[in-house]
Image (tube, rainbow, N blue to C red):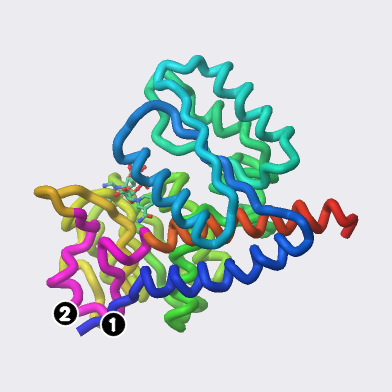
Amino acid sequence: MARILDGKAIAKQVKDELRQRVSQLRETGLVPKLVVVLVGDDAASASYVRSKSRAAQDVGIDAEVIQMPANIAEDELIRALERLNEDNTVHAVLVQLPLPAHLDTDRILMHVHPAKDVDGFHPVNIGRYATGTPLLWPCTTAGILEILERSEIPIAGRTAVIVGRSRIVGWPTAQLLLAHNATVIQCHRQTVNLREYTRQADILVAAAGQPSLIGPDDVKVGATVIDVGINRVGGHLVGDVDFAAVEEKAGAITPVPGGVGPLTVAMLMKNTVHLAEIHQREKEGF
Ligand code: NDP
């Protein structure tokens, strides 16, 4: 039976450590501030934003949610982001995705200043981690590293297979594992015979958004399986991995819910604190 990698417990450790860092910043007069921009009234997005606000409050970060109407014009949204870029009390800005269809997500994300881009989606920040000088890593990717490191799962020299290549999860995760010296295989919808690759994985990251994509025959005995997927099936949340069957074969596995999800939120807080600390150092002239 696999070891269950308890994301909730790891996220709690991360947040406990952050509380310390936040109180040190507060002693210098700086209150880390995260602004979440929520466009429209998508229920799932609103619920994610609520959990981000709660987590911020929990560690002492000042979180503000700016709610914009679903029909907002692109230029108006960009002007709002530019005001946040100029506001020295704001250290981190997040645009909750997905945006309504009439908005050009790539164009909008370009207008979050790279120094406040807490999600790591700005091309400058993608370029930084792709060239080995990351300012920060996207939250889910950073959360996966946190799970692996705190569970003492070695990365260097291991074969890591990532199913998914999105800008939000799959691609940065492949870059991060490569930067930590794994041998990386990246799979996607056009991968022929997916199983041939997933069965090679010492570390298998499933980030496809397809329930039951990964079953026991897709996994090597003893592998570490990180299930990023969040899918609603029959009123329940499930991942991309057939947990009950794969648990029998894997060496370690993250559950859904309670695996990667809590880390994504915790790493948003860690990235916010990181950006606030950089802001503080720059203010002091270091
Ligand atoms: P996207 O839909 O943007 O990307 C999915 C990726 O998976 C694509 O690269 C796609 O390939 C690939 N893919 C889809 N189906 C298959 C398949 N059958 N075989 C191989 N590859 C496949 O999704 P995201 O990356 O944004 O999210 C992935 C999942 O992770 C979702 O369930 C999402 O809800 C969840 N998620 C969870 C988070 C958490 O905190 N736990 C945070 C963010 C996302 P191609 O490029 O060829 O289309």
Residue 264 visible (yes or no): yes
Q: Is residue 238 within the magenta segment? A: yes
Q: Residue at x 47, y 69 (%)?
A: 183
Q: Position of residue 78 (x, y in %)?
A: 60, 23
Q: Helix or strand or loop: what does disc 2 sit on? A: loop
| Whole-percent x, y for residue 82 in the image | 67, 28
Look at label 2 and name its amino acid: Glu
Residue 179 horizontal side relative to residue 152, left or right: right
Which residue lies at the image location 72% right of the left edge and 59% below the top edge? Answer: 277
Name the residue carrying label 2: 248
Please name the amino acid that badge 1 sits on. Answer: Arg
Picture quadrant of residue 140: bottom left
Which quadrant of the figure contains the C terminus? bottom right
Residue 81 appears left or right of 247: right
Picture residue at 48% right of the left edge, 24% below the top: 104
- Secondary element type, mark 1: strand
Residue at screen point 30% across, 78% down: 252
Q: What percent of the width, then of the height, locates residue 103?
A: 46, 22
Q: From mark 1 to mark 2, how far is it between C-alphas?
A: 10 Å
Is 90 above or below relative to 18? above
Total of numbered circles in the picture?
2
Please name whichever residue, 109 or 39, is drawn nearer the observer in this view of the structure.
Answer: 39
Lower sequence index among marks 1 and 2: 1
> What span is colored magenta in the figure?
237-261
- The disc placed on residue 3 is 1
**63 displayed left or right of 115:** left
User: Residue 119: which numbered mark, if any?
Assistant: none
Which mark lies nearer to you, 1 or 2? Answer: 1
Position of residue 9 measured from the top left corner of the image (x, y, whole percent): 39, 74
Q: Is residue 105 magenta?
A: no
Q: Is residue 128 above or below residue 105?
A: below
